[in-house]
Image: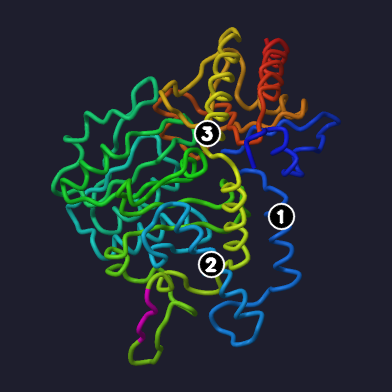
């Protein structure tokens, strides 16, 4: 399918509805993306015709679902450029993926006196797990600062990453500023000091994609629901040689080899980290979302989203008192802003009554808010289905809100 935004919108049933008797303008894909019809129908079909637990049954339904689940793993592997399927662990989402690493990896490799480096623009899910790990193991947390434009100040790396640094955890694209850091520079420097790197790919995997092998990151985490797949499914990529050395994160069914009261041995990768009943339907639906994306010209999608971001920035900046946060090059399709004399909450609430859905608040990034001296921002985040007409509606809506509140 060639990139045609109007034709693509037809694949997303939710976008055609009205709210408050107005056409829906959905500009909150950074929180969760809408689902194409093929994903919705695939998920429903699986529950109607093939719902059975995987890996444990010998009957037809179980055998077939197991095969689809493992095929989904292969599709994810190809989509992110991993070398082997054993490097792909299915989780409930990026938060679970990062917590898995923060606990299991830290148990094996983190010691008192070590340090972990994160950036100032991380989502809470890439901060709090590392704080917990540091507290548990007696390590320190260090922070890469960000400048006024939203760029990570990478000149500070030699001061922050040293021989005691064990982990660097950094976003591929900020969920608030849209900043896309120079990951290769960070990864290469971290590796030169003996540290490993986890990349939060939630916003990056859907906007520009990733090749984890070329990037040479040690871990990569993302959620399906921001990649046009259902909620409750996520992925952790890890280098096999590191995953092999990490202890299991959770115990239970499917992650064991043999269990006795004397000793339990564990299943090989990736099942060692997939305890309990997997979200097998979600995994197959994630594969369906990837299949949908693979029908598109992804370079054309990226260019469309870039143009939307530039257009939104230019139009919003015509509003008196407008402040946009994150004015970096090659940013993800996210525009966060405030307007002088108006609270972000009021702007979001009034826009909602106009049928325009944006996000307001701290976006699970309170340290970013503190850095820029605010307690919250309005955020418009775009997906491949958004249009310039919707941005025009946003700008006109904000203008109307400003007029009302002032």
* Image mark for residue 71: 2
Please tell me how crowded label 1 is: few (under 14), some (14-19), or many (20+) other residues with Cα within 10 Å.
Answer: some
* Along the line of sight, the residue nearer the viewer: 26 or 340: 26
Question: Can you identify the residue that label 1 sits on?
Answer: 40
Residue 229 screen position, x and y as percent: 61, 52
Structural distance between the alpha carbons of marks 3 and 2: 27 Å
Please tell me how crowded label 2 is: few (under 14), some (14-19), or many (20+) other residues with Cα within 10 Å.
Answer: some
- SS class, disc 3: helix
The image quadrant of residue 61 is bottom right
Q: Which secondary structure type mostly characterizes the magenta part of the structure? A: strand
**311 lies above or below 196:** above
Q: Residue 143 colored magenta?
A: no
Question: Can you identify the residue that label 3 sits on?
Answer: 302
The image quadrant of residue 6 is top right
Q: Quadrant of the N terminus?
A: top right
- Position of 5 with respect to 134 (left or right) is right
Q: Residue at x 69, y 73 (%)?
A: 50
Please tell me how crowded label 3 is: few (under 14), some (14-19), or many (20+) other residues with Cα within 10 Å.
Answer: some
* Along the line of sight, the residue nearer the viewer: 10 or 110: 10
- SS class, disc 2: helix
**221 lies above or below 307:** below
First in sequence: mark 3 or mark 2? Answer: 2
- SS class, disc 1: helix
Marks 3/2 in contact by CB < 8 Å: the verdict is no
Structural distance between the alpha carbons of marks 2 and 1: 19 Å
Residue lying at the far left in this picture: please name it. 163
* Along the line of sight, the residue nearer the viewer: 196 or 206: 206
Residue 351 screen position, x and y as percent: 71, 25
Magenta-colored span: 264-268
């Amino acid at each position: 399918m060639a990139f045609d935004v109007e034709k693509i919108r037809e694949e997303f049933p939710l976008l055609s509805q009205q709210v408050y008797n107005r056409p829906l303008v959905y500009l909150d894909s950074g929180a969760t993306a809408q689902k194409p019809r093929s994903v919705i129908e695939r998920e429903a079909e699986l529950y109607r015709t093939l719902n059975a637990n995987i890996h444990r049954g010998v009957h037809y339904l179980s055998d077939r679902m197991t095969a689809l689940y493992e095929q989904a793993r292969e599709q994810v592997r190809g989509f992110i450029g991993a070398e082997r399927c054993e490097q792909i662990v299915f989780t409930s989402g990026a938060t679970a993926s990062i917590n898995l690493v923060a606990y299991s990896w830290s148990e094996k490799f983190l010691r008192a006196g070590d340090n972990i480096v994160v950036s100032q623009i991380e989502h809470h899910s890439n901060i709090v797990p590392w704080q917990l790990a540091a507290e548990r193991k007696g390590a320190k947390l260090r922070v890469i600062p960000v400048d006024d434009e939203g760029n990570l100040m990478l000149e500070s790396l030699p001061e922050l990453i040293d021989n005691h640094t064990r982990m660097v955890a950094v976003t591929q694209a900020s969920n608030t500023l849209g900043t896309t850091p120079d990951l290769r520079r960070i990864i290469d420097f971290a590796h030169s000091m003996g540290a490993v790197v986890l990349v939060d790919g939630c916003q990056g995997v859907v906007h520009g994609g990733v090749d984890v092998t070329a990037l040479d990151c040690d871990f990569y985490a993302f959620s399906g629901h921001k990649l046009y797949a259902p909620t409750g499914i996520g992925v952790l990529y890890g280098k096999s040689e590191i995953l092999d050395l990490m202890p299991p994160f959770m115990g239970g069914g499917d992650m064991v080899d043999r269990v006795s009261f004397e000793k339990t041995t564990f299943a090989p990768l990736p099942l060692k980290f997939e305890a309990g009943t997997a979200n097998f339907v979600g995994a197959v639906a994630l594969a369906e979302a990837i299949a949908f994306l693979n029908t598109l010209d992804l370079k054309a999608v990226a260019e469309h989203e870039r143009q939307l971001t530039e257009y939104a920035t230019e139009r919003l900046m015509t509003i008196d008192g407008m402040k946009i946060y994150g004015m970096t090059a090659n940013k993800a399709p996210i525009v966060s802003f405030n307007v002088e004399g108006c609270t972000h909450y009021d702007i979001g609430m009034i826009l909602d009554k106009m049928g325009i859905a944006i996000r307001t608040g701290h976006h699970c990034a309170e340290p970013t808010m503190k850095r820029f001296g605010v307690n919250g921002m309005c955020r418009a985040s775009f997906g491949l289905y958004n249009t310039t007409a919707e941005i025009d509606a946003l700008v006109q809506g904000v203008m109307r809100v400003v007029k009302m509140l002032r």
